[in-house]
Amino acid sequence: MSDPRTSGGTRPVERAKRGALQSGREVRAMFGRIVPRYDLMNRIMTGRRDLAWRKMVARQVGKAPLVLDVATGTGDLAFALREAGAKRVIGADFSDRMIATAVKKAAHEQRTGTAFLVGDALCLPFADGTFDACTVGFGLRNMVSFEAALREMRRILRPGGRFVCLEMTPFRRPILGPLFRVYFEQGVPLVGGLLSGDLKAYRYLPRSVTAFPAAHDLADLMHEVGFTDVEYQLLAFGTVAIHTGLRPAE
Ligand SMILES: C[S@@+](CC[C@H](N)C(=O)[O-])C[C@H]1O[C@@H](n2cnc3c(N)ncnc32)[C@H](O)[C@@H]1O
């Protein structure tokens, strides 16, 4: 019998090393275009569950002194981290429009303890071992190399520092699968296209999830780049995953 994890002629961890379906330039431009309705679309698509998932990530990080939230977008995960007790949170994203929105939200909502900067996850402007924890929420799937991004996020963690990744994960359940697929591949692009005026961006979303490594393959890749204590939990009928790992103490 063929092993589904090794079908297609490529080992899962090799497949998991691939990156986003679009170039970095295309991804940055796409997120730049959808910024105005980005938060609203997240709430609608998930029935506001995205807020609860970010809180779960933030609880995993707890009261860490210094946290980097990579691909921070409009800053929602950075704000959740502060609310859960992180002392200082830096949010980095390569879209200057996303960062401008995060900065505006922080000022408007009078939030303290967060700072935002424009930066690429594949080349973070920080020395090795700077952060006590590093998070990435719905960002890894959009990066041009999953492996290079994971290595870079491990690099900026101090030994013993914690990495937490919140991401959509390819849907496998046979009963709910077709229903979810209709919702995700037809409903989401329709509503997202109408609200944001960018049908292309919300067509990209389901395709990018299908192309993303399965949760166990992502866990294998995390091991391979040097994280230890790798664990993951599936949420929302197995459509969302939270992976955690540690940079080993040296
Ligand atoms: C789906 S949004 C997630 C935003 C936010 N983390 C959240 O929880 O809503 C993906 C974000 O990843 C950012 N991104 C993609 N590739 C990146 C990279 N190489 N470096 C930095 N940010 C990146 C995009 O600009 C976008 O803001």
Image (tube, rainbow, N blue to C red):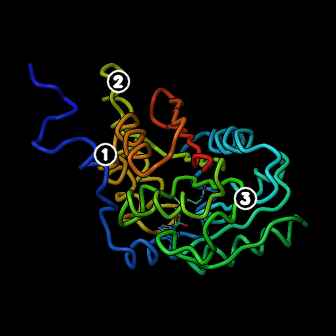
Q: Nearer the N terminus, badge 2 or badge 3?
A: 3
- Marks 2 and 3 sit apart, C-alpha to C-alpha, by 34 Å
Label 3: state its secondary structure: strand
* Image position of 183 with respect to 107: above or below: above
**Residue 108 relative to residue 139: left or right:** right
In this view, the mark in front (3 or 1): 3
Residue for badge 2: 173
- Image point 55% across, 45% down: which residue? 166
Query: What is the x, y in percent for residue 29?
Result: 45, 78
Tag 2, which secondary structure?
loop
Residue 218 horizontal/vertical position (percent): 39, 43
Give the CA distance from mark 3 to mark 1.
30 Å
Residue 54 percent location from the top left of the image: 67, 45
The disc label shown at residue 25, or none? none
Q: Is residue 210 left or right of residue 195?
A: left
Q: Viewer-proximal residue, 35 or 196?
A: 35
- The residue indicated by pointer 1 is 210
Image marks 2 and 3: residues in contact by CB distance under 8 Å: no
Which residue corresponds to the image point at 72% horizontal and 67% vertical from the top-left?
90
Give the mark count.
3
Name the N-terminal-most of marks 2 and 1.
2
* Amino acid at circle 1: Thr
Type of the residue with mark 2:
Arg
Amino acid bearing label 3: Val
